[in-house]
Amino acid sequence: MSTKTNLIIFAILLILALPANAQDSETAETIEPTPKGSTRGQLPPRPNPEDDLRTKRDQLREDAMERKEEVRDAIKDRRDDIRDTMMDKKGGMMEKAGDIRERMRTMMSSDKDFAGVPEKLREKIIDQKEKFAEKLEKFKDKKKKELAEKIEEQIQKVNQRLSAHFLESAEKLTEILSRIEGRTKIAKDRGADVSSVETATTKAKASIAKLIDASEKQKNKVFAVSIQSETTARSDFGKSRKELNSDIEALKALAQQARVDVRKAAVALSNIKESQPEVEDTVAPTPSASTSPETTN
């Protein structure tokens, strides 16, 4: 082969080799050198099973500690809530007791049934009201509780009203008997035999005294209404009503007897010619006392 031919072949090979070298040069320029100690381009290390197990165990321990703290905090909060509730309830009961006393005092000061009732007796009635209210705390039905409170108050009021009624009747009979005694003295001064009138008058005085004594005792009586439970409230109130009715009937009988005895004294006086005009018509019958509808059941 001639020298010319070799040169041509060398030139062709040189031309073909130039693009490849240029590409390699460009690639070399764009690739940054990897810093020493860097793991770029290296495969990540394999995970160690023991490390994973240790990590999970530590995580479970932390979770258990957090749950334990949460439970402890929840128990503490619950304990505090219970204590606060009990304190609030106790405070509410004390406040309620104070409200009861104030309400009862206000009611008694404006209610005519309690007019003239001594302060000492009023306090006894209020004390009984507080004891009764404590028993009503067990009631679940609010309407029954309110009704029970009204009935208990009504029993006390009816007792006061009717006791005062019979005391007024005794006072009126005493006034009538006093007039009879005055006219008896006039007839006696005129020489009339007034022994029958005096006997009747003495008996009438004794009857009136019994009526006054029983009425005063009844007026000072505070009915201790006892309720065992919400289910027995109806029958328990029935016992108190029956007791009140029995007491009032006894007073009614005494009032009737006193009225009869005063009338007998008036009739005896009218049978004496020397006496003043008849006074029988001035003896008005004692009004019939009856309990209110609330106490007749």
Image (cartoon, rainbow, N blue to C red):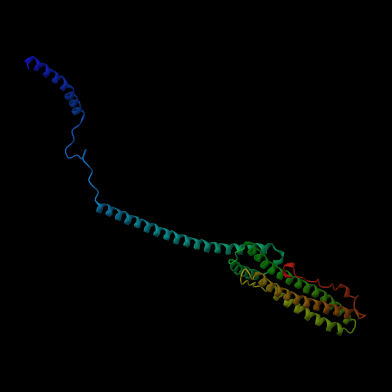
277 is higher (above) or lower (below) than 105: below
Q: Is residue 70 left or right of residue 35?
A: right
Which corner quadrant of the image does residue 193 belong to?
Answer: bottom right
Which corner quadrant of the image does residue 70 belong to?
Answer: bottom left
Indicate the position of residue 205 as horizontal and vertical percent values.
79, 80
Q: Is residue 283 left or right of residue 165?
A: right
Q: Residue furthest top?
A: 4
Indicate the position of residue 99 as horizontal and vertical percent values.
59, 62
Would residue 264 be visible to someone looking at this image? yes
Indicate the position of residue 219 as horizontal and vertical percent values.
70, 73
Task: Quarter of the image for the C terminus: give it.
Answer: bottom right
Q: Residue furthest front?
A: 1
283 is higher (above) or lower (below) than 71: below
266 is higher (above) or lower (below) than 129: below
Would residue 279 be visible to someone looking at this image? no
125 is higher (above) or lower (below) than 273: above
Indicate the position of residue 112 as horizontal and vertical percent values.
72, 64
Task: Quarter of the image for the N terminus: give it.
Answer: top left
In front of the other: 57 or 173: 57
Q: Is residue 287 left or right of residue 104?
A: right
Q: Residue at the location (37% across, 57% down)?
A: 67
Q: Is residue 46 left or right of residue 227?
A: left
Q: Residue furthest right?
A: 273
Which corner quadrant of the image does residue 285 belong to?
Answer: bottom right
Q: Residue at the location (9% across, 16% down)?
A: 5
In front of the other: 18 or 123: 18
